[in-house]
Amino acid sequence: MITLIIIELQKIFKKWRTYIGFIAIGILVPLAQWALYAEGLQGYQNMITRRLGDAFITGGSVLNGYLLAYIVLQGLYIHFPFLIVLVGGDLFSSEATAGTYRILLTRPITRSQVVISKFIAGLIYTGSLLLWLMILSFGISVLLFGSGALMVFIDKIYIFSSSDVLWRFLSAYSFAFISLSVVCTLAFLLSSLMENAIGPIITTMAVIVIFTILSFLPFEVLDKFRPYFFTTYLDEWKMFFTDPIDFTSIIKSGIILIGHIVGFYTITLIIFIKKDILS
Amino acid sequence: MSSEKIIEIKNLSKRFKKLVAVNNLNLNVYKGDVFGFLGPNGAGKSTTIRMLLTLIKPTSGSIKIFNKDLEQNRIEILSKVGAIVEKPDFYMYLTAYKNLEILAKTSGVDISKNKIMEMLEIVGLVARYNSKVKTFSHGMKQRLGIAQALVHDPELIILDEPTTGLDPQGMKEIRDLIVYLSKEKGKTVFLSSHILREIELIATRMIIINKGAAEVEGKVEDLLNIDKLKVKFEVNDSQRAFNIIERSNWKKNYLSTDNNYIIFEMEKMEIHELTKFFINNGIEISSVIPMRSLEDYFLKITEESSV
């Protein structure tokens, strides 16, 4: 099984499209860091303090690596699924397009092994892309701008002392990994149904966009459906930057997202095992 | 020929909704055979091969390979089978070497670099081992297809139209390689083709299928040589020739007349006698065309399938 996973990773990382995500993050994060450092942070600080009017006075600058990392994560996270589906949507469909199903599935391996090795390889790609984001947005920001107290605004202002920040970031990145794994697994499922890579990529993004819009539309009639949209829980990582943290809500969201991963994976497995390879 | 069955197919059928692709097919392939699986395009050859390789599931019937049920022993069986299904496709963004390495590892073989190079040497691609497959011609991919089928040293090799799209030299090389694998390496080869001549050149046993069903099966030499030949004599005056034949012992061999052609069924050694008979009776002969009945039959079903 490890051999199969390594082979799947080789297939992923030998393709040019795999590096689009890494290059995009590699360009966008330093750009965002530079822009925020050059002129945006004062605006950000003003925006937060303006909400409290004259009742709140900040001493010194809130600019530090933690704040930059938070802003970059918040800004890029919305677009992150686009980068995940580029590879997730290609996991099966590229084999169908290239006709390599025929040489792969006539080897002495089970179809379940094929599915699980592709699935794990997809998750490793998702994790590595997130790790890259973490290194650039968190690691480099802290390296360049140092650490300090973190002031964030979610529904209200939260200020965390420097010693209380690191675990929140690690937890947020871990939760983000679960969220993005749902996106990757959805793309993976659609990839097993289609014979070209464009279909799963566009369809996954369409599903995310539609569900996200439905999650935010201010109609009461949609309220009873919202808990069933996985997009409702995708940005739950932000809850790690609140105080007190509602762990019950986070665990519930995590279970729902993992349930989606298991569900999408199981459907893929059943479909793929029964599939006649005609391409 | 050994009596050990390597492939045993019983009452195999495959339906795609209303289309019956394979219909109650039975066949046996014995150890050491180069088994010709012959049929026109659309006869059900590739569907049968896909079922042999578990790419598609049969609607009914059973397949035994190495005397074991394929469905129950899929992994064990496939570890001893190498195959090309239709055109050979590879991971285009990888080199020939990397493709073979990956496919060998997927077959559970921890292959050495020397072994991969040896495979590439056999198929004449050693100079291009480090080139990405996307730069390969169709013929090169076809040869790499043979290499990937052999890379884990299988006992049974299943080749689905391996010479399609090759130039005459490439076709000959592939045929020579199949004969080498059979005679020198003792492999059993299941070779699908729609070209009778190809099967005749290299197969020991054969089956002809049409519309998903078996038509004839047996040793190639029996099927192609023992049957009486159909022989077409092109004459200058077919009516006068017919009148002469009517009054002779050759009447029993006469089949039909088609413009200037008079067609007889006869054994090979009789052709010379009939030719002499015509000449002695003042009939000029422009050409004599022997046609084996099986070849004639195969041409007929091929023509029908292409209409």
Image: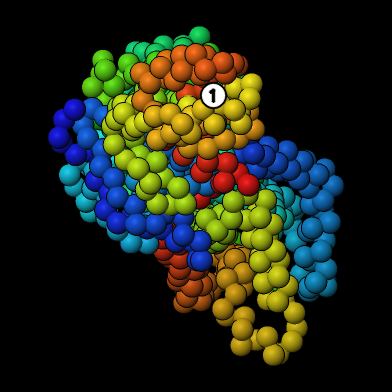
Q: Nearer the viewer, residue B248 or B118?
A: B248
Q: Name, please, the residue furthest toward the bottom.
A: A221
Q: Residue A55, position in %: x, y?
A: 78, 74
* Vertical relation: B92 (above or below) B268: below
Q: Say which residue appears at 77% left-offset and 65% top-offset.
A: A48
Is residue B300 among what the camera can see?
Answer: yes
Label 1, secondary structure: give it. strand
Q: Nearer the viewer, residue A77 or A110?
A: A110
* Vertical relation: B89 (above or below) A175: above
Is residue A81 among what the camera can see?
Answer: no
Q: Residue B259, position in %: x, y?
A: 64, 33
Q: Residue A219, position in %: x, y?
A: 74, 87
State which quadrant residue B225 falls in: top left
Tell me the amino acid under the disc marked 1: Phe
- Residue highlighted by disc 1: B233
- Report crowding for label 1: few under 14, some 14 to 19, many 20 or more residues within 10 A (C-alpha): many
Q: Quadrant of the N terminus of chain B?
A: top left
Q: Which chain is mark 1 on?
A: B
Left or right of A233 on screen, residue A273: left
Q: Say which residue appears at 46% left-offset and 31% top-offset.
A: B247
Q: Name, please, the residue furthest toward the top.
A: B127
Q: Residue B246, position in %: x, y?
A: 48, 34
Q: How many marks?
A: 1
Q: Say which residue appears at 34% left-offset and 57% top-offset.
A: B24
Q: Name, please, the residue furthest toward the left.
A: B3
